[in-house]
Image (spheres, coloured by chain):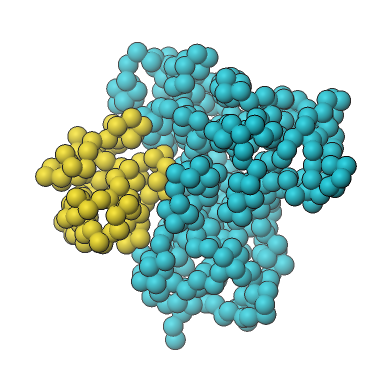
Chain colours: A yellow, B cyan
């Protein structure tokens, strides 16, 4: 199991367990993490699963590219470390990952 | 006593409603009745990532089994509701079981509209997992498919069939594809793209009849068109729209008018019964009373229903939005273009694969079709919702980033 932590804008953290291969969005949805609406179910279409990757982790997670990058560029509150978490596939090296959920 | 909420339907709306009930603080029982044997799953990827083998069925589930266990959401699958006993507040299942409710949510969805000539084994539809498994059998290199209907479902099917090197002919009764939902500019664009991918599109012609195999009458070998032409096929895919599942509501005496009638908080004409998703007609902010067929609507309406069920109604003022994935093109639509009086193009729809079409009515943006233009899509959602006026020449100015223009 991989442990990841979602941290909301009020500083409340939710620690959840994931299987390798899950997307961070799927784990958030399965655990009712507030602020992750994930309306399109992972099609990279809706930009409702925005997270900001903790700077210690961004190199391992990787930066947004292509369509995801385009979506993020027009999203309020998005920055360099922003990702749509439906595009983050969890692997064992991401055990301990911290993702901030910006206020939507 | 513990309150009970029954949800009839386990599609996008039902699944969201169950989750939202818990988020809104519903502590009573939740029972979701679904007519398929599986946990609620995402429908859009069925004909795409799932069919193509890029994702397993488990990966397209909306939520995993543990979620329902953890949240105490009881699933009654492979079961259908046959009636609602409103005086006694119970749902009766087809096997005779009675499920008592305090609150009832109808998320019965829609079913595909079928051809009048039914009963051919190789005439296929696209809606459920079973439909896709039936289609899978026919996916072999060089097979010939005819798709009836040039709407989003038909065109998405064409795109995925080309991936499997199936030869594809699309038959559309209107004079252009996507005629019901987009401007001619978009239709022309998609007709060009599909033609480049080797899809034959025949517009302005209707089906005169299906041709049965002389030896195996349960197989169709092609069809005849009303213009005298005939087209051979190894299989036929039908995408001619859906019919809302309103029978249960209608038989129970709820108000139904082309869909289960709800208000902006997803309440039906019975104060203890709510409805969400494709099966409903409801007021859509700025666009009138509509029946929307989309995941986005199912999700938003389900959230509204959950709040209302928990006694804290919150109107659904969300802007309708849609998406369609074909080949490497992502179309994202914000708003509804019906009734537009002017269209403004941004980018080149004739030679490129990245552009946006803005629909205006009396100077205000009411909708935007964005092809591989995520930024335009997200910002249009805002512009439409805010009802801001924006000069057409600015919308069209593709030399500057859209974000800068609308800032």
Q: Outermost residue toward the bottom?
A: B1
Which of the 4 quarters of the picture holds residue B270? bottom right
Return the x and y of residue B2 as percentages of the image width and height.
44, 83
Q: Quadrant of the C terminus of chain B?
A: top left
Up-down: is B105 above or below A83? below
Residue plotted at (78% across, 29% down): B231
Residue plotted at (33% across, 53% down): A22
Residue plotted at (46% across, 79% down): B3
Return the x and y of residue B13 as percentages of the image width and height.
51, 57
- Does the image show residue B199? yes
User: Foreground: A89 or B70?
Assistant: A89
Q: Quadrant of the N terminus of chain B?
A: bottom left
Q: Position of B118 compared to B315: left or right? A: right
Residue plotted at (21% across, 59% down): A3
User: Foreground: B270 or B30?
Assistant: B30
- Does the image show residue B181? no
Up-down: is B305 above or below B45? below
Return the x and y of residue B204 as percentages of the image width and height.
75, 25
User: Foreground: B165 or B295?
Assistant: B165
């Amino acid at each position: 199991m991989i442990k990841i932590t979602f941290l909301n804008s009020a500083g409340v953290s939710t620690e959840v367990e994931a299987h390798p291969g899950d997307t961070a969005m799927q784990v958030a949805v399965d655990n009712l993490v507030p602020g992750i609406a994930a309306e399109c179910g992972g099609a990279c279409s809706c930009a409702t699963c925005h997270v900001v990757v903790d700077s210690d982790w961004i190199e391992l997670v990787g930066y947004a590219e292509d369509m995801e990058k385009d979506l993020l560029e027009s999203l309020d509150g998005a920055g360099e470390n922003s990702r749509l978490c439906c595009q983050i596939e969890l692997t064992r090296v991401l055990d301990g990952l911290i993702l901030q959920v910006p206020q939507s | 006593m513990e309150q009970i909420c029954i949800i009839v339907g386990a599609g996008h709306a039902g699944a969201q409603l169950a989750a939202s009930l818990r988020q809104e603080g519903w502590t009573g029982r939740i029972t979701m009745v679904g007519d398929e044997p599986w946990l609620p799953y995402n429908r859009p990827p069925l004909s795409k990532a799932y069919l193509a083998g890029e994702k397993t069925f488990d990966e397209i589930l909306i939520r995993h089994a543990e979620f329902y266990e953890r949240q105490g959401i009881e699933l009654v699958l492979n079961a259908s509701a046959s009636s609602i006993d409103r005086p006694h507040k119970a749902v009766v299942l087809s096997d005779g079981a009675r499920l008592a409710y305090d609150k009832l949510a109808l998320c019965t969805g829609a079913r595909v509209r079928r051809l009048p000539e039914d009963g051919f084994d190789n005439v296929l539809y696209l809606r459920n997992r079973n439909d896709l498994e039936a289609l899978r059998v026919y996916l072999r290199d060089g097979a010939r498919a005819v798709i009836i209907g040039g709407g989003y479902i038909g065109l998405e099917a064409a795109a995925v069939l080309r991936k499997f090197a199936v030869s594809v002919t699309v038959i559309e009764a209107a004079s252009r594809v996507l005629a019901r939902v987009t401007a001619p500019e978009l239709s022309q664009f998609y007709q060009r793209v599909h033609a480049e991918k080797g899809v034959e599109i025949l517009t302005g012609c209707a089906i005169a009849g299906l041709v049965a195999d002389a030896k195996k009458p349960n197989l169709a070998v092609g069809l005849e068109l009303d213009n005298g032409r005939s087209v051979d096929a190894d299989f036929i895919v039908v995408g001619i729209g859906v019919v809302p599942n309103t029978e249960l509501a209608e038989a129970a005496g709820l108000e139904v008018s082309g869909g289960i009638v709800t208000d902006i908080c997803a309440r039906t004409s019975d104060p203890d019964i709510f409805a969400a998703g494709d099966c409903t007609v409801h007021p859509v902010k700025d666009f009138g009373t509509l029946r929307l067929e989309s995941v986005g609507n199912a999700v938003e309406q389900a959230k509204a229903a959950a709040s209302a069920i928990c006694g804290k109604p919150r109107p659904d003022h969300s802007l309708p939005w849609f998406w369609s994935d074909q080949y490497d093109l992502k179309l994202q639509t914000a708003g509804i273009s019906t009734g537009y009086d002017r269209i403004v193009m941004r980018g080149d729809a004739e030679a490129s694969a990245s552009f946006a079409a803005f629909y205006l009515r009396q100077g205000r943006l009411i909708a935007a079709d964005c092809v591989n233009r995520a930024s335009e899509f997200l910002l249009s959602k805002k512009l439409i919702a805010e009802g801001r006026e924006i000069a057409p020449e600015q919308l069209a100015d593709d030399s500057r980033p859209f974000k800068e223009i609308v800032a």
